[in-house]
Amino acid sequence: MASSVYDFQALSIDGKPADLASQRGKVLLIVNTASQCGFTPQFKGLESLWQEFGEQGLVIVGFPSNEFGGQDPGSNEDIASFCELNFGVSFPMMEKIKVNGADAHPLWQWLKSQKPGFLGTELIKWNFTKFLIGRDGQVIKRYAPNDAPASLRADIEAALKVEAKA
């Protein structure tokens, strides 16, 4: 059983292996994204956080998902192009995954078990659910889809102030 976010791997949006252990000691904001959702403009806010706090140790990781209303139907290449052209996304994006059900990516199964949502449900209810991970690889907080990226600023700043343990 996984003990931290560093126990997981994924594939980047261009198909290359991405080992989350390579982010050890950083603060992560992991988000399920979609290109055709009412919350899609949050890409701009996520990119702003990445630009502002990246050098201090924040890494934003987007995981596209087509589970909610079919709002990310394109290929990984289409999604990458859309995010870059429309929102200037330069933070890491992973390949399209499932976040719910038996086929949910193992990372997302773990995230949901660590910080269940409203009334204890582990289900991801919509696009742009966010998980803040501390430098120790543990989930600090889960945010709802309608929580704007800017509203996470104080929590991110607090997480960045915590020193990574050797």
Image: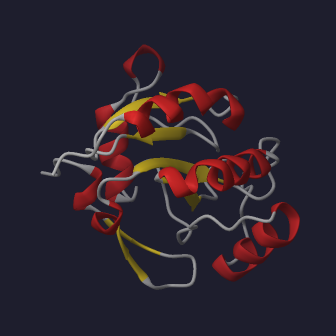
Left or right: where 133 falls relative to 65: left
Where in the figure is residue 20, as x and y percent of width and height?
34, 64
Where in the figure is residue 152, as x and y percent of width and height?
60, 30
State the residue lying farthest toward the top.
Answer: 119
Foreground residue among 28 and 51: 51
State the residue lying farthest toward the right.
Answer: 86
The residue drawn where x is 82% and y is 47% is 41
User: To which quarter of the image does residue 84 belong?
Assistant: bottom right
Left or right: where 77 falls relative to 67: right
The residue drawn where x is 70% and y is 33% is 150
Q: How is the image coloured?
A: secondary structure
The residue drawn where x is 61% and y is 32% is 153
For residue 87, say whether it is visible.
yes
The answer to whether 31 is drawn above or below residue 12 in the figure is: above
The answer to whether 18 is drawn above or below residue 111 in the figure is: below
Where in the figure is residue 28, as x and y percent of width and height?
44, 49
How many numbered marks are there?
0
Foreground residue among 71 and 29: 29
The answer to whether 1 is drawn above or below residue 119 in the figure is: below
Foreground residue among 17 and 58: 58
For residue 148, say whether it is visible.
no
The answer to whether 60 is drawn above or below residue 93 in the figure is: above
The residue drawn where x is 33% and y is 47% is 109
Where in the figure is residue 107, as x and y percent of width and height?
34, 55
Left or right: where 134 falls relative to 66: left
